[in-house]
Image (spheres, rainbow, N blue to C red):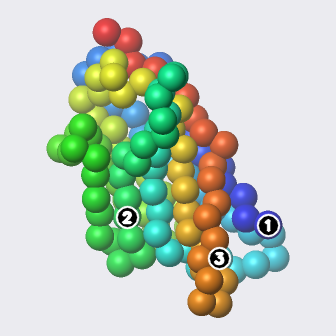
Amino acid sequence: QVQLVESGGGLVQAGGSLRLSCAASASGSILTINDMGWYRQAPGKQRELVAFISSGGDTNYADSVKGRFTISRDNAKNTGYLQMNSLKPEDTAVYYCKVVVLVGVNGYDYWGQGTQVTVSS
């Protein structure tokens, strides 16, 4: 069973920064992680993709966070990161990481438990 542990959320003033982490593990198994992504869900809104990074390091961002957020990964540690700078109140949401774990030729999605990010004005 794959487990994802997220950390790094919290309360920050507008203009501040936070760094989210998402560590994947599976007891007794070696993980092969394909794509990784960060999503967020604000109250009353649908979950949306914030940033994406492929196994090869290609990245993609939502227009609302381009130039402010940076997604990265450390494959040796099976960990993904989201560096969030110049935070705005509208970035307030629960942030979730998602990884695609490869088992043979099949990919399986796993989600983190979510971490709250609150940006005060």
Where does residue 121 sit, x and y in percent of width and height? Answer: 31, 9
Which label belongs to residue 1? Answer: 1
**On screen, residue 107 above or below 25:** below
Q: Are marks 3 and 1 in contact (CB under 8 Å)?
A: no
How many C-alpha atoms fall within 10 Å of the one at disc 1: few (<14), some, or many (≥20)? few
Q: Which residue is mark 3?
A: 31
38 or 22: nearer the eye?
38
The residue under the point 60% across, 89% down is 105
Residue identified by numbered label 2: 53
Q: Residue at x 54, y 44 (%)?
A: 96
Residue 27: horizontal and vertical position, in percent?
A: 80, 69
Give above or below for 39 relative to 116: below
Of residues 19 and 108, the one drawn nearer to the viewer in this rendering: 108
Q: Which three-letter amino acid code belongs to the residue tagged 2?
A: Ile
Q: Residue lying farthest left?
A: 67
- Quadrant assignment, res 113: top right
Q: Mark 1 is on which residue type?
A: Gln
Q: Residue at x 28, y 35 (%)?
A: 85
Q: Secondary structure at mark 1?
A: loop
2 sits to left or right of 119: right
Q: Quadrant of residue 78?
A: bottom right
